[in-house]
Image (tube, rainbow, N blue to C red):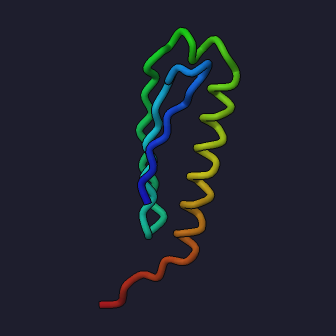
Amino acid sequence: MQESTDIVIEEATVASLTLSVYETGDLSVQFNIVDPQRFHATEDSKTDLNELISQAIETSKEKFASYTIPQN
């Protein structure tokens, strides 16, 4: 699963986040702040980021819990 999301404050994109969660439960995150002034000026952007990361971690846990190691 790969998902890209923009964090938008006052109709302006302040950050972008790309998450990749693999069947094994591995998780890759790329985070870019594109408007530091707006991003750091509001708690909303940090709250959005925390929610997105928490959801990705839960997805990773679920995939890991259901992953079966292939037998040779």
- Determine which quarter of the picture holds residue 11: top right
Q: Is residue 8 above or below residue 61?
A: above
Residue at the location (66% across, 42% down)? 51
Q: Residue furthest bottom?
A: 72
- In this rendering, the answer to whether 40 lies above or below 70 is above
Choose between 69 and 51: the one closer to the eye. 51
Residue 40 vertical placement versus 56 (above, below): above
Q: Nearer the viewer, residue 11 or 72?
A: 11
**x 59%, y 63%: residue:** 61
Which residue extends farthest front? 11
Tell me where residue 25 appears, x and y as whole percent: 48, 64
Give the mark count: 0
x 37%, y 85%: residue: 70
The quadrant in which the C terminus is found is bottom left
In the picture, the quarter occupied by the N terminus is bottom left
| Horizontal arrangement in the rendering, residue 48 relative to residue 1 (left or right) | right
Residue 59: name its quadrant.
Answer: bottom right
Q: Please report the residue visible at 64 percent of the width from the left and 27 percent of the height from the top.
A: 46
Residue 63 point in image, percent of width and height: 53, 69
Q: Vertical placement of 5 versus 25: above or below? A: above
Q: Position of residue 57 (x, y in %)?
A: 58, 53
Left/right of residue 53 with respect to residue 6 in the rendered view:
right
> x and y percent of residue 68 in the render?
47, 82
